Amino acid sequence: MERQITAIHVQKHDPDRLNIELDGEFAFGLSRLVAAWLKVGDFLSEDRITTLIESDSSEVAYQKATRLLDYRPRTEKEIRQRLIQKGFGTLEIDQVVIRLKRANLVQDQQFAKMWIENRNDYHPRSQRLMRYELRIKGVSEQLIESALADSADDIELATRAAAHYARKLNYQDREVFRKKLSAYLARRGFSYGTITPVIRNLIRELEQDQSNNLENEDDNGKY
């Protein structure tokens, strides 16, 4: 049995969506994209109505996904989880992911590289911890290892992290300084075998700087 479109109205609170009336009664809402070829007077079969509603649901899911990506890049797993939370079905989500990949909006390989570069530059932590973070986000082991291949090693990363955190500490008591810095690096995922030489080298550099400063003060005092 076919039903006739008797009116098409723009929704009050969302001008990108239209209300479709069939046989004089409100039937369903559609995005402008899905409803692009509809006009008053058209007849719709039940199968056509079902297809339109399913297409609209897929389009709504896609728009929600792109809005999520406007905030920050996300992995495929993150997109799927958020759409599941919003009540979309597996078929709709699969269609959305395919569209996002075709548009290069979701690429786990690029995400992994970006994530590691960001961590290395602004929040240094161990490769082990970065590997764990990416696993949680659903990145495959192969892509994780490929991205980590271009990362600095743990000694360099721990050195960066230690130098940054050391500025917040008062280097008066060597043992207190060592304990606080060691605990910080451990929270960043570094092993004892990495932490020990990094802190030892940093303390040596700090004490050398102090010694040089004292020598400069003595030299200045002679004049």
Image (cartoon, rainbow, N blue to C red):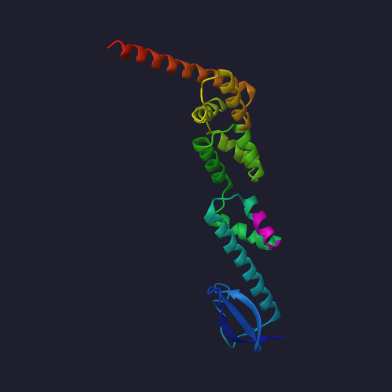
x and y, in percent, of residue 99 in the image: 58, 59
Q: Camera-side residue: 209 or 75?
A: 209
**Residue 138: image location, x then y, percent:** 65, 46
Examine the rendered structure and indicate whether residue 93 appears above or below residue 160: below
**Along the horizontal axis of the image, is 186 left or right of 161?**
right
Occupied quadrant, residue 52: bottom right
In the figure, 55 relative to 2: above or below?
A: above
- Image spot of residue 71 (x, y percent): 53, 54
Query: Does any portion of residue 104 appear in the rendered image?
Result: no
Quarter holding residue 158: top right
Closer to us: 199 or 217: 217
Please report the residue visible at 62 percent of the width from the left and 27 percent of the height from the top.
Answer: 183
Residue beneath the point at 59% across and 20% down: 196
Residue extending farthest to the right is 1
Q: Tell me where the magenta segment starts and ends, as one range.
A: 80-89
**Is residue 7 found inside the magenta-colored segment of the image?**
no
**Quadrant (top left/top right/bottom left/bottom right) for the C terminus:** top left
7 to 117, vertically: above or below: below
Tell me if residue 84 is in the magenta stretch: yes
Across the whole image, how many numbered discs are drawn on residues? 0
